[in-house]
Image: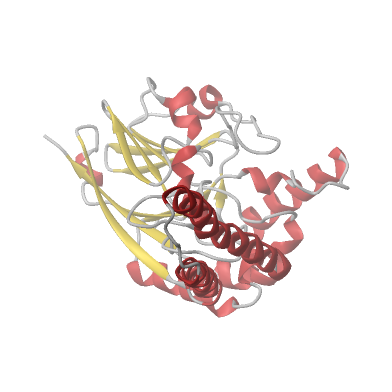
Amino acid sequence: MVLFLILSAVFLCLVLALVPNLVFAIVWVVGKIAHVAVPYRWFGYSALALVVLCLLLLAYGYFVGRYRQVVKEVIFEHHDVPASFDGYRLVHISDLHVSSFKQNPANLQRVVDKINTLQPDMVCFTGDMVSFTADELYPYVNVLQSLKAKDGVFSVLGNHDYATYVRDFTDAQKQQSVNRLIGLERDSLGWQLLLNESAQIVRGNDTLSVIGCENHSCSGNGISPIKRGRLDEAMAGTSGFRILLTHDPTHWRGEVLGKDIPLTLSGHTHAAQFRIFGWTPARWIYPESDGLYTQGDQSLYVNTGLGCTVPFRIGAPQEITVITLKHKE
């Protein structure tokens, strides 16, 4: 990971240094035509300043940004929220990529402690527990075991959880890794992992159905996109107010819209782990890249994750989302 950061920094520095030099080349040509002398040193200073800025940003993202946490409060109003669940608080987290906490395991403990302090009714995790194989989870079982909510922790699998990116694994070895991860989440962590399944929470005469789909990409973006979700199967037998957990936000526009699912939770994008003035390059790939989106009576919330696939976060800190359900007249 450190090598990747160094190579990325060198590449970005070269690109940034090239920009003022290209500008200088254009100005120099114009100067020759107009017989005007152009002092080069100002372009050199600009190139140096851009390189230094780039290095400072990367250093910040690596040492500070990737461990900074924010709690986002979202009020979700909908006319289908039952009266018994008015004010119901759920915490939405995603994309732990637990191996990214290897250099700072105390940061993961702070995440868990912060969530427990919020005393949520339910915690929803929308996939990518690991980056490559289930073995990454073993050192963090004790920490994640302590994550608590009144009605439990519900989770789904993300694209990384299928050992998709381990090149030398056979299909059988990948499935073994998936099976280990399933066992760890369900048995060791005590989470309710939903694999094209649902769970119901009942209060009085009202029901809240939590639907969990396996990873299902509807865009074709990314390397080896996974399409294992079976939404109709997952919805079977559900009633009341439905919340869907699905890792890839493209699933919402590709299949969920038009179904009786008022609220969908997803992750996957990380907001490219880079956001400046509210903009992230993830929007070039994902129309729904971060935050809350609404179309008609249906909404999608995209959480930008807690872990990293590359070791920095700039302007896109670790996100813990608190969603409060409100009945709308």
What is the tally of numbered marks visible in this picture?
0
Above or below — where is 295 with respect to 327? above
Horizontal and vertical percent for residue 234?
53, 29
Q: Is 300 situated left or right of 328 in this image?
A: right
View extreme (left): residue: 329
Horizontal and vertical percent for residue 105?
60, 77
Q: Is 319 situated left or right of 164 in this image?
A: left
Looking at this view, is 150 or 264 the one in front?
A: 264
Query: Could you tell me which residue is drawn at 49 percent across and 47 percent down?
Result: 267
Looking at this view, is 5 or 47 the one in front?
A: 47
Query: Could you tell me which residue is drawn at 80 percent across and 44 percent down?
Result: 174
Looking at this view, is 217 or 34 the one in front?
A: 34
Query: Could you tell me which residue is drawn at 61 percent across and 55 percent down?
Result: 129
User: Would you identify the image quadrant in which residue 137 lies?
Assistant: bottom right
Above or below — where is 238 with respect to 64? above
Q: Is 29 situated left or right of 100 in this image?
A: left
Horizontal and vertical percent for residue 112?
47, 70
Q: Quadrant of the C terminus?
A: top left
Query: Could you tell me which residue is drawn at 49 percent across and 52 percent down?
Result: 32
Whether residue 183 is visible: yes
Horizontal and vertical percent for residue 66?
51, 68
View extreme (front): residue: 35
User: Would you identify the image quadrant in which residue 95 lies?
Assistant: bottom right
Tell me how the rendering is colored: secondary structure
Q: Quadrant of the N terminus?
A: bottom right
Whether residue 94 is visible: no
